[in-house]
Amino acid sequence: MTITITPLDDSFAVQVSGIQPSGAVRAEDIAAMRKALTAHGVVVIRGQKFDDREHIEFSRHFGELEIHTQRAWLLPDMPEILALNNRGERGTKPIMNGGSYWHSDVSYKAMPPMGSLLHAIEIPPEGGDTLYSNMCEAYDALDDETKTLIDGRRAIHSYAHRYQAQAAGDPERPQLTAEQLAEIPAVGHPMVRTHPETGRKALFVNEGFTTGIEGMDDAEARALLDRLFAHCVDPRFVYRHRWQVDDLVFWDNRMTQHSATSFDQRFKRNMHRTTVAGDVPA
Ligand code: OGA
Ligand code: MN
């Protein structure tokens, strides 16, 4: 099958045709996917049928898969799959407001994942789009003074405070245990990271998990972070993904961030995610 790459809505995101996540996947398909991912940041495969097992196998071609700290959201027999399902399924806890803030997945760990692959199983008739923003473009567009200010600086990322904020809007969200909290101490990451595969610089702070800046007092850090968060979501860097059933969206967490949008909770929305391990941001 010939592989074609088409921009979506004149944005940075692309659709890849000619690759299917099911069955025997060719080495050249994986190479093409990886190349498209690192070049564009968000890659969509559309209109292909595949199951959870195939989703996992396809994802594994790109690296080891991570298991999320909140085990209550993982499929019992396939913990590589996080079920972002507002009804819950097979014993998983429902997630009412998952990812409804700008973030790069799991940036609160010392080794954040390189990418995530999200499969639309069931979608509401309207709403529930996902927004993606390109952090290489956002970095490039900063003024020189800001670049100088943040280059070489490190920011603090933490899951606990975000988790509590989300719990306030979702009575179903289980408490994190002491053991889970111990898995996720706050970490420091460079505010600007260099993409290990393309060498491009990307802004690496996000509203979801970034709580401060090392060596900067709180008020100054807050003002700078708020300014950067607003910059990150400038519409010129943003792609809005309108889901279709069976879409598989693969995004590069090293150079993009994303946010869920709201939808009427009378409708069911069920998305399955795998998460591919990455490296220490540098
Ligand atoms: C995720 C996520 C957003 C959405 O799966 O990591 O943030 O719209 N999803 O479901
Ligand atoms: Mn996410």
Image (cartoon, rainbow, N blue to C red):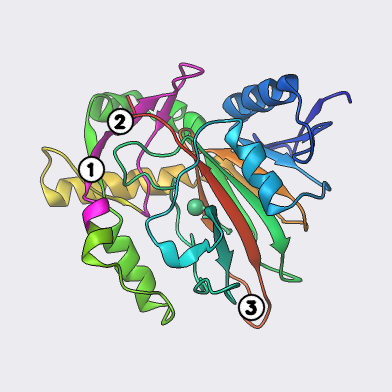
Instruction: Give the spatial CA distance, label 3 vs label 2.
Output: 39 Å
The answer, for residue 25, to whether it is visible in the render is yes
The percent position of residue 149, horizontal first and vertical second, equals: 24, 29
The percent position of residue 15, horizontal first and vertical second, equals: 75, 37
Instruction: Give the spatial CA distance, label 1 vs label 3.
Output: 35 Å
Q: Say what amino acid the circle numbered 1 marks.
A: Val
Does dot 1 land on a helix, a strand or a loop? strand
Q: Say what amino acid the circle numbered 2 marks.
A: Thr
Tell whether 95 sits left or right of 130. left
Within-10-Å neighbours for mark 3: few <14, some 14–19, many 20+:
few
Residue beneath disc 3: 264
Seen at 22% across and 30% down, the residue is: 153
Nearest to the eye among marks 2 and 1: give it: 1
Nearest to the eye among marks 1 and 3: give it: 1
Q: Say what amino acid the circle numbered 3 marks.
A: Asp
The magenta segment is 182-208
Tell whether 79 sits left or right of 111. right
Point out which mark residue 187 bears: 1
Seen at 82% across and 50% down, the residue is: 49
- Say whether residue 206 is magenta: yes
Marked residue nearer the N-terminal end (3 or 2): 2
Tell whether 229 sits left or right of 225. right
Which residue is outermost to the front?
A: 77
Point out which mark residue 146 bears: 2
The percent position of residue 235, horizontal first and vertical second, equals: 56, 46
Nearest to the eye among marks 3 and 2: give it: 3
Within-10-Å neighbours for mark 2: few <14, some 14–19, many 20+:
few
Does dot 3 land on a helix, a strand or a loop? loop
Does dot 2 land on a helix, a strand or a loop? helix
- From this view, report whether residue 145 is shown above or below residue 15: above
Marked residue nearer the N-terminal end (1 or 3): 1
